[in-house]
Amino acid sequence: MGHYIQGDVVIAPVSFEERRGAKTRPAVVIATGGNDEVYFCPVSSKPASDAPCVPISLDDFSEGGLDLFGESYVLTSRIRKIRSGEVIGKWGRLTDESMTSIAIQVPQSLESENDRVKRTKRSRSLR
């Protein structure tokens, strides 16, 4: 079982509501949670026509990369959650700048439970 952090680019099974089953595809880790949960946004070779997405290219990687011939797109509105043991592998890591442009597109309501717990503990200790 691997340990993943925000900005890692992994290969994972991704299911879409409109289709049955899962497809193995690249994904960007946006957060982690309790119980070994990994929250991620899938990566597609085509931009979403109905939702926000962020283009990425090989220049956006600080480590590793994907087999990209052109841009790919991080589907920031399609957050998925799996257990870290379900991740097939890690392909690289995005630069901090690239991760920041992705993070601002992710709906705030989808932050991980772990982040909510940390924030609650911090606010209690400030009282």
Image: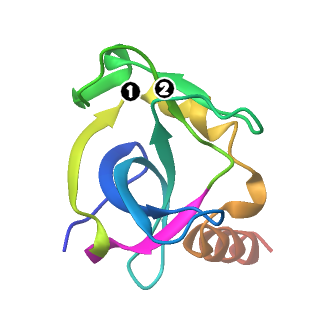
Q: Is residue 71 left or right of residue 55?
A: left
Residue 108 lies, in percent from the top left, at: 75, 54
* Residue in the image at 64% along x and 66% along y: 17
- Amino acid type shown at disc 1: Thr
* Residue in the image at 74% along x and 78% along y: 124
Q: Quadrant of residue 9?
A: top left
Way the structure is coloured? rainbow
| Residue at mark 1 | 95
Residue 72 lies, in percent from the top left, at: 45, 26
Check residue 12 in the rendering and tell me which mark sits there, or answer none.
none
| Camera-side residue of 65 and 98 | 65
* Quadrant of the drawing holding the N terminus: bottom left
Q: Is residue 92 above or below residue 14?
A: above
* Residue in the image at 70% along x and 37% along y: 105
Residue 37 inside the magenta-drawn segment = no
Q: Is residue 77 above or below residue 61?
A: below
* Quadrant of the drawing holding the C terminus: bottom right
Q: Residues within 10 Å of mark 1 (few under 14, many from 20)?
A: some
Name the secondary structure under disc 2.
Answer: helix
| Camera-side residue of 113 and 88 | 88
Q: Residues within 10 Å of mark 2 (few under 14, many from 20)?
A: some
Name the secondary structure under disc 1.
Answer: loop
* CA gap, disc 2 and disc 1: 5 Å
Residue 52 lies, in percent from the top left, at: 72, 35
Instruction: Find the magenta span and give its range.
Output: 79-85
| Camera-side residue of 3 and 57 | 57
- Asked whether disc 2 touches disc 1, contact meaning CB atoms under 8 Å apart, the reply is yes
* Residue in the image at 49% along x and 48% along y: 42
Check residue 98 in the rendering and tell me which mark sits there, or answer none.
2
Q: Is residue 122 left or right of residue 99?
A: right
- Amino acid type shown at disc 2: Ser
Q: Quadrant of residue 2?
A: bottom left
